[in-house]
């Protein structure tokens, strides 16, 4: 596809790795997936795929640049109906309303959470908060460790004291330890405190912001201000979900979706208002939609109304709405990430 077609959103666009520097280590699993020499591993644990979202406090860092040098964000703004479809554009404007990352935790991530839409709008000047979801694609050994939600109801004073004292042991022991394996998915509502363990490799979908309230900032961030994003912990701790999450509640957000069907819905209806994800295989037929494709295994061909593209393990593509419906051939296994559900 020529650069003009790519920029105007008339066909699929292959994307190279896009790894902004982070505060934590990782990136080896991204390099292994994409192939030697295609990714950066020193403090490059996140690959922001088809990103129109910059890192917090930055102008363009984290955003995707097309082959012609144009930011994907600007291309979408110039041709929103081509890229996103009319119904999505009518609801969200020229914003895909989703951010997709490959995240390879080379070390345990700190305990943190993210604000809701309402909190972000009221306190942070952002239309979107940051509900997210994890599709587990790699773990060490027999499984990886994540920590999700407090085991019991906690007072605001207790949480504030832990943060003020940077009591890591208390924070971690208060969270539910959960073992995850490839094929599992975790839906993480805004406000839910969590930490991802070392060696867990995920495809992450989230609302298009970089808003994180880091409860455990010591030994991770340069300063306390980074933990509260400059708003103060007296403000941002109000976004933390301090309710208890028992086994039944956890089962509602941690799922196993191993399925050999051509198309498998991975996240279910609770996530559909924020983003959607499918595991696709050869034989799949796909509707027209803005989508981000991450190829995990094998190889194949995606045939669209305007031609076909070869997809191999490690490839990432962005598909505009105007590419139309498509069909998948071959032994390809991929994750197809989609924006919030709207009626076209």
Image (spheres, grey):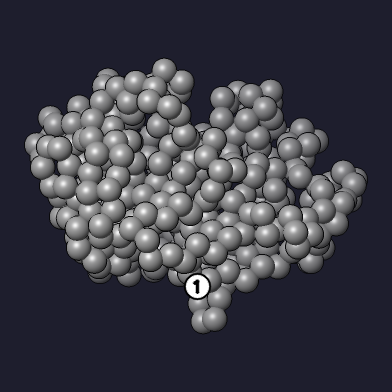
Few, some or many residues within 10 Å of mark 1 (<14, 14–19, 20+)? many
Horizontal relation, residue 19 to residue 182: left or right: left
Quadrant for residue 102, please give it: bottom left
Q: Is residue 56 visible?
A: no
From what the image shows, is residue 194 above or below residue 157?
below
Q: Residue at x 77, y 40 (%)?
A: 237
- Where residue 192 appears, as percent x and y from the top left, is 70, 48
- Where residue 127 appears, as percent x and y from the top left, is 56, 25
Of residues 73 and 24, which is closer to you in this image?
Answer: 73
Horizontal relation, residue 72 to residue 89: left or right: left
- Where residue 152 appears, as percent x and y from the top left, is 85, 57
Of residues 94 and 227, which is closer to you in this image?
Answer: 94
Q: Quadrant of the C terminus?
A: top left
Furthest residue toward top:
90
Q: Quadrant of the N terminus?
A: top left
Q: Residue at x 24, y 39 (%)?
A: 325
From what the image shows, is residue 323 above or below residue 20?
above
Furthest residue toward bottom:
141
- Where residue 166 appears, as percent x and y from the top left, is 78, 56
Q: Residue at x 58, y 56 (%)?
A: 186
From what the image shows, is residue 48 above or below residue 102?
above
Horizontal relation, residue 56 to residue 110: left or right: left
Of residues 50 and 170, which is closer to you in this image?
Answer: 50
Of residues 100 and 280, which is closer to you in this image?
Answer: 280
Q: Is residue 79 visible?
A: yes
């Amino acid at each position: 596809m020529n650069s003009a077609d790519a920029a105007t959103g008339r066909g699929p666009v292959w994307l190279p790795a896009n790894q902004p520097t982070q505060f934590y280590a990782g990136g080896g699993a991204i390099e292994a997936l994409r192939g030697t020499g295609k990714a950066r591993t020193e403090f490059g644990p996140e690959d922001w795929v088809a990103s129109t979202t910059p890192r917090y406090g930055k102008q363009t860092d984290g955003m995707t640049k097309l082959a012609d040098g144009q930011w994907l964000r600007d291309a979408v703004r110039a041709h929103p109906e081509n890229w996103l479809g009319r119904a999505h554009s009518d609801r969200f404007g020229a914003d895909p309303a989703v951010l997709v990352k490959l995240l390879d935790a080379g070390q345990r991530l700190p305990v943190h959470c993210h604000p809701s839409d309402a909190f972000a709008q009221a306190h942070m000047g952002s239309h979107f908060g940051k509900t997210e979801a994890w599709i587990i694609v790699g773990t060490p050994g027999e499984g990886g460790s994540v920590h999700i939600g407090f085991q019991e109801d906690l007072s605001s004073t207790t949480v504030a004291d832990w943060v003020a004292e940077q009591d890591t042991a208390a924070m971690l022991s208060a969270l539910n330890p959960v073992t995850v394996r490839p094929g599992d998915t975790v839906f993480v509502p805004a406000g839910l405190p969590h930490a991802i363990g070392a060696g867990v490799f995920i495809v992450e979908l989230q609302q298009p912001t970089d808003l994180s309230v880091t409860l455990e900032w010591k030994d991770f961030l340069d300063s306390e201000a980074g933990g509260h994003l400059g708003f103060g912990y007296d403000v941002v701790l109000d976004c933390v979900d301090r309710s208890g999450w028992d086994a039944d509640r956890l089962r509602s957000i941690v799922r196993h979706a191993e399925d050999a069907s051509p198309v498998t819905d991975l996240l279910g209806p609770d996530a559909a208002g924020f983003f959607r994800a499918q595991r696709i295989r050869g034989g799949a037929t796909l509707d027209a939609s803005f989508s981000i494709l991450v190829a995990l295994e094998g190889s194949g061909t995606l045939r669209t109304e305007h031609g076909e593209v070869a997809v191999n393990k490690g490839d990432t593509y962005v598909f505009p709405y105007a590419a139309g419906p498509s069909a998948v051939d071959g032994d390809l296994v991929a994750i197809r990430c989609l924006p919030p559900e709207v009626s076209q």
